[in-house]
Image (cartoon, coloured by chain):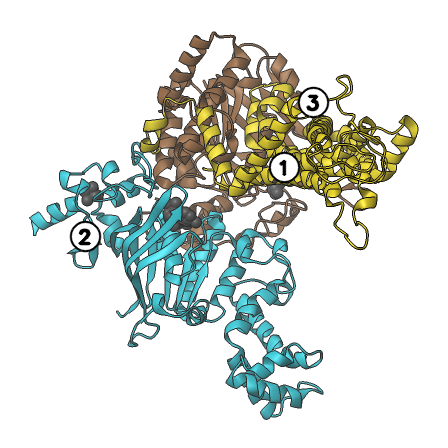
Amino acid sequence: METSTAMTAVQAHEHPRLRELKFTLARIFRNPSAVIGVVLLSFFIGVAIAAPYIAPPKYAHAPYKMPHKGFSPTPKAPSERFIMGTTSGQYDIFYGVVWGTRTAFKIGLFVVGIAGFVGITLGVLAGYYGGWFDEFLMRFVDIVWSIPLLVLAMTIVVAFGRGLENIMIALALVEWRWYVRVIRSEVLKLRNQEFVQAAKLMGVSDCKIILRHILPNSIYPVLIMGSMDMGSMVISASFMSFVGLGAPKGYADWGQMVALARNYIVGPSNDPLQFWYTIFFPGICIILFVLAWNLLGDALRDAFDPKLRRR
Amino acid sequence: MAVLLKAQDLTTNFYTYEGAVKALDKFSLSIDHGCTFGLVGESGCGKSVTVRSMLRVIQSPGVIEGGKVLFSEKADAEPVDLLALTEEEMESVRGDSISMIFQEPNAALNPVITIGDQVAESFLFHRVAEMSQKICDAIDSGESYGLLTPYYRAMLGVAAKNPKAPLLKFCSQVPFLKWWDKPVKKEALQRAIKIIGKLGIANPEEIVTRYPHNLSGGMKQRIVIAIALACHPTLLIADEATSNLDVTVQAQILQLLNDLKKESISSILLITHDLGVVAETCEKVGVMYAGTLCETGDVKDVFSTPLHPYTQALLTSVPKFNQEGELQSIEGSVPNLVNPPSGCRFHPRCPKAMDKCSTDKPELKELIPGHLVACHHADRVIGGLS
Amino acid sequence: MKKKIIELKGLEKHYPVFGGVLKRQVNSVKALDGIDLDIYRGECLGVVGESGCGKTTTGKAIINLHAPTGGEAIYYPEDGDPMDLAKMSNRQMKNAGIRSRLQMVFQDPTTSLNPRMLIKHIIAEPIKEQEKLSARELEKKIVSILEMVGLSRMHLMRYPHEFSGGQRQRIAVARAIAASPEFIVLDEPTSALDVSVQAQILNLLDKLRKELNLTYLFVTHHLLVVKYISTRIAVMYLGKCIETCPTDELFSNPLHPYTHALLSGIPNPEVAAEPNRIVLEGDVPSPLNPPSGCRFHTRCPFCIDVCSREEPVLLDVGNDHKVACHRQDVVKELVKEKFGIEGYF
Ligand SMILES: Nc1ncnc2c1ncn2[C@@H]1O[C@H](COP(=O)(O)OP(=O)(O)O)[C@@H](O)[C@H]1O
Ligand SMILES: Nc1ncnc2c1ncn2[C@@H]1O[C@H](COP(=O)(O)OP(=O)(O)O)[C@@H](O)[C@H]1O
Ligand code: SF4
Ligand SMILES: [Mg+2]
Ligand SMILES: [Mg+2]
């Protein structure tokens, strides 16, 4: 009747959700950095999926173990056989970089998945119901907030032994506190919104209100944060590996490979860049991986910015 | 009466994602000295854009594409085109000759600065030279400002001639020396207290030490008015200044504006969507629709014999004291100005529309002396009569 | 014989104010401080007053959106025994089958509609809570409701942001009537809208009330709007009801000085009118520490000694007209004497 009939003439038969999705995607991809992010990310996903074909594992039962020829501590420069060279202990850098992609996704998805799930559930419940549960949870979060990640990681490693899994658990154990805070503050804003009150007046149950009204309107900041976290968790895990808490020696993990290159970052005094490949390939992977997620997160933030939404 | 402000063919576009929003289309308006002019229209029809364009404070995707805004502060002076001034010259016009009050007092007041400092600010911006001169005279005639009196006298002597002198700027950066402006600040605060007191606020000495959040909505709006009036502007623009207030507070503010007009300001441009406010406080009125002026003239003429179908519809859609029968409403809503209707912008909603309306844009014509209308229908009816 | 639908007896709503280190309650905002009011079936009761005087709080307390802190709100169903809503929880109301009979339409349609739901789902929500319908029947019902508020099938699959303000308010009204209510609180339903659209919504609401036999509590600060749509008016000041009477009576024979001030403050769009204003001094006092005696005495132009000492009771003066003022019998002459106002037409 009143609204711009011109606009609807073309799009009328399209399902509105599709239209909305298209609009959001158009907004995301208007941003060149988003395009770069998505391209980088697709590249990493491709590598991760195709890992068994790009770099066939030597031991089918343990593909994450990097194969090595010999034990010499001196890295070897890229050659026909090892196109990215070998690192200290003669581990194949190319193999490690390829399978390390899978490890990176594993770390990101696991940590963000667990932290996000726990954080969102607790945050929504605390924000929506408030009261003593909210009070209790927020004090508990304050306590978690005071635990240094490194100390927690060391404790877990001392208790359960060295391994990537333990590091991932340690990261998830501290990371959820972010999600609780963010989603709780979103829910607090929404809880007294008039559309939520209207739903209450109609006798809609709390469970349906949360799923239908609260979550869809509060999830976007969490998605943005999750996207950024995918990258930063990989950095944290790499750092743990670098200080010797994470993946064991020889595990296909970028951080662990950087750790292996530790003594060769600067070569002999006559040729300081002699062993550049030991640090360059895993290092650049970490940087690009984090960059990809950050670009994506930034683009999402712009696209979901409520101030920019059409009215 | 002499013309104070005259906008001619003002055109403003907003370049947005969806296309160019043609918010003002050859808009013309003129306000006389000593007149209270009401500008009415539905929301989104460009009232705020009009005044923002005239003062050149349009926000970012907006561009003033053309037109003139002729302003003659003295009745017999040669008018200046505000759109042709430099930004610096414009800054001295804003707040000094023309002031503006917005709808939201909270947006206009800084929450972390006391009321007194905020009102004094506007004196410090526009009136340093005059105040310095006054203090110099006071010192010359024997008044003492403490130990530093000779220093104050020297510095203020400079400030009285040129408040932007490099020496003053330099001294303001140096510890101790930067206190040269203390007497001026004190004087500004005194003036602030005086003007706040004039606005009917009890014990202004106490109010100036408060922060905005300690005041009620009506009180805040009065402070905003005090800031706007500080430098005795020739034209006061009030953009929906009373729309958020209750009738009782609105009555206070409108009475205040009326009293002020008699003594200190020359003209008021009152923007509102409340026809009742216009009927009671204004002498002239302009009715806007979708970026164009459709009708203007004396309030009595326009409201008692509206000629434009839009004005007629607007008047029948508000409830009245002696309302009889159903309210009439205008079908549809303000069009999207990315693709404004051709011809007369009102024709898709107009009950009197003719073929000509969708093709030709009606001109603003003086159909009855002092009563201008842009409508083909009115043109035909009145033209046929005379 | 008029039948009551809701009767308020000393209804109270105090919002606690916490302070100090231990977050103890130090005071309370007396948003609603003992209000007595009868609402009859099929009427439209207008509630007017300055902002902050507790109009919205009244509406929300009656339908138990914010639980009252004291007093009674008795609901008389058409079938069955009266119940005290003030003592019931949301769940109890749902179990008694009366939750959806009391609805509310909010001031701003932009915030009262979920921006991520389609119109179809917004209207379907209350219907689904009440009956199980097949998808086809449900859609049919939704369309019939949309048509009732002047929208059509074509609007089903759209998001709220694709509508104009007036249309959004129609959707909000549609959602309220989809719950098949008996009583609707309308909280300033036209204040966020344009004058030209306001008339559409007012006419729609009036039509729906007559067609569906609804009862309205119409909250507004706009007296001419309330005059147009209401059958009876209650004037509120600082959490108290100070005058109630039929609409025409209020405009022809106002008794409370505050009502006079409100009426004389209305800007009249008719240019012939000669405005004579009662301009009140100062602002509404804080509901944290309301004045003693008559709450209006700090601003009342006719205040006498007794006003600051004793609180006037809401007195029935005949003609279905109740007023709470110590000087109600002489106010009219005082107004004429001091301000030269004889009437408001
Ligand atoms: N910053 C902006 N960006 C895009 N369009 C704008 C902007 N500001 C105003 N407009 C457009 O200009 C028109 C007039 O707006 P405005 O002057 O604010 O209306 P009013 O004050 O009469 O309610 C509207 O159609 C609006 O869409
Ligand atoms: N949730 C709340 N917490 C504390 N005070 C409130 C709350 N809601 C309203 N109030 C206070 O109650 C008083 C009445 O508010 P309200 O009913 O919204 O007034 P109205 O609708 O008449 O403008 C106001 O002083 C307001 O500050
Ligand atoms: S010009 Fe035509 S369309 Fe426009 S208002 Fe007049 S009659 Fe209506
Ligand atoms: Mg505006
Ligand atoms: Mg309210």
| Numbered mark located on residue B118 in the image | none
Asked whether mark 1 lies closer than 8 Å to ligand 1, one says no
| Numbered mark located on residue B363 in the image | 2
For residue C207, which quarter of the picture? top left
Per the image, label 2 sits on a secondary structure element best described as loop
Residue B183 in view of the camera = no
Locate residue A288 relative to residue B258 in the image: left or right.
right
| Picture residue at 52% right of the left edge, 34% below the top | C111
Q: Nearer the viewer, residue C245 or C138?
A: C138
Q: Looking at the picture, does residue B98 appear above or below residue C310?
A: below
Q: What is the C-alpha distance between the residues marked 1 and 3? A: 27 Å
| Picture residue at 59% right of the left edge, 19% below the top | A204
The kind of residue tagged 1 is: Trp
Q: Which residue in the structure is indicated by mark 3?
A: A56
Considering only order in the chain, which callout, 3 or 1, is on the residue closer to the N terminus? 3
Query: Decide: marks 1, 2 in contact (CB < 8 A)?
Result: no
Q: Nearer the viewer, residue B343 or A247?
A: A247
Chain assigned brown: C
To the question of a shared chain for discs 1 and 2, the answer is no
Q: What's the chain of the residue with tag 2?
A: B
Chain assigned yellow: A
The kind of residue tagged 2 is: Glu
Q: What's the chain of the residue with tag 1?
A: A
Query: Decide: marks 1, 3 in contact (CB < 8 A)?
Result: no
Q: What is the C-alpha distance between the residues marked 2 and 3? A: 80 Å
Q: What is the C-alpha distance between the residues marked 1 and 2? A: 58 Å
Instruction: Give the color of chain B as drawn.
Output: cyan
Asked whether mark 2 lies closer than 8 Å to ligand 3, one says no
Q: Which residue in the structure is indicated by mark 1?
A: A293
